[in-house]
Amino acid sequence: MSELTVCLTFDLDAESAQIRQKENPVRISKGQFAIQRGMPRILSLLNKYEINATFFVCGWVAETYPETVSNILIKEHEVAAHGYMHEYLDKLSYDVEQTIHNRTDTILENLGGKVQGFRAPYWILSNYTLEIISDLGYIYDSSLMNEDRPHTYTIPETDKRIVEFPVEWYLDDWILFEEKQQTPSAVFEIWKSQFDAMMEMEDREENRCVYTLTCHPSCIGHSYRIQVLERLIKYMNSHKAQFSKMKKIATDFFL
Ligand SMILES: [Zn+2]
C-alpha cells in the first residue's frame, strides 16, 4: 500500500480572542493553557515522532509569547499567519484588515519565520482576505471547504491564484472535544475512519490527497486528548503516512 500525506496543523490562538473581546479571567485562562501546557506537550510529541508540523499563529500571540514561536521555529516547524487578535475578518474594512495582516506578517518575520501561508480565524474569510495575503506573497491558504484535496484556487474577481488546503469541521479538535463533547475514543475513531477512507480512495494518488488535521493547543494539549493525537500518529505511521509542512506541499506540487 502506498503512502498518504498528512499535515498536522495547530492554530495557536492562545487567549488573543478572549483579550480582544474583554472576556472574564476564566475564559482568558483557558486560552493561556495553550502556552502553559499545550505547546510544550505538542512540541514534545512531534519531537518524539520526528514530525514537522504547521502552526498558524496570531500576531498578538507571537508578540506576547516570542519564546513559544522560537521554540516552534527551532525545531524547523512552519509558522504561518492567523490574524492579529483572532479577528472576525468579515466584520472589518479593507484597510483595517490589510493593516492586521501586514502587522502580523512583520511580527512573525521578525521572529525568524518567513510566512508563506494563512488560515482564517474561525475559518471566516472576508471578501478581501485572499487578495490581501496573495499581495503579501503568501502562496497558500487553509480556510475553505470547496474540496477535500489541496488544489490551485483562483481568487474570485481577480486573476490571482493561490494553493488551497481545504479544512473540515470533523477534522478539528475544537468541534469534537469542546462543542460536541466527544470522548477521546470517539474522537480517535472519527479521525481514524477519515484516514482509512482516504487510504481507500482509488484516485488519491493522482489527486494528491492530503489528510489535514486542525488542532488547538488549548484543546488538544490536555493530557487525555494529546494521547488521542499520539494514538493517531502511531496508527498513521503503521500505514506509512508521510507527515509534511503545508508550505512544502504547496511548493513541491503546486508551484
Ligand atoms: Zn484560531
Image: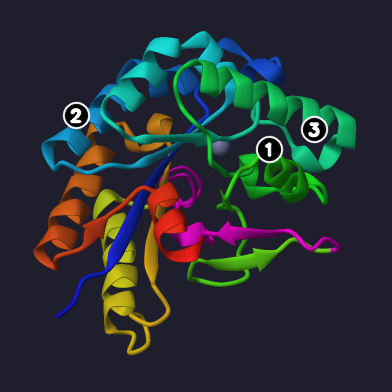
Q: Earlier in the sequence, mark 3 or mark 2?
A: 2
The disc labelled 2 sits on which kind of residue?
Ser
Counting from the top left corner in percent of width and height, residue 228 is at: 23, 48
Name the residue at 32% across, 32% down: 221
Q: Look at 79% across and 63% down and name the residue there.
A: 159
198 w.r.t. 21: above or below: below
Task: Report the residue marked by disc 3.
Answer: 97
Q: For the magenta stretch, what is the residue range? A: 157-180
| Distance between mark 3 and mark 2 Cα atoms | 35 Å
* Residue 245 in view here: yes
Q: Earlier in the sequence, mark 1 or mark 2?
A: 2
Q: Label 2: which residue?
A: 44
Q: Quadrant of the N terminus?
A: bottom left
Label 3: state its secondary structure.
Answer: helix
In the image, what residue type sits under mark 3?
Answer: Glu
Q: In the figure, residue 27 lies in which quadrant?
A: top right
Q: Give the spatial CA distance, label 1 vs label 2.
A: 32 Å
Give the quarter of the image for residue 53: top left
Q: Which residue is mark 1?
A: 136
Q: Quadrant of residue 74?
A: top left
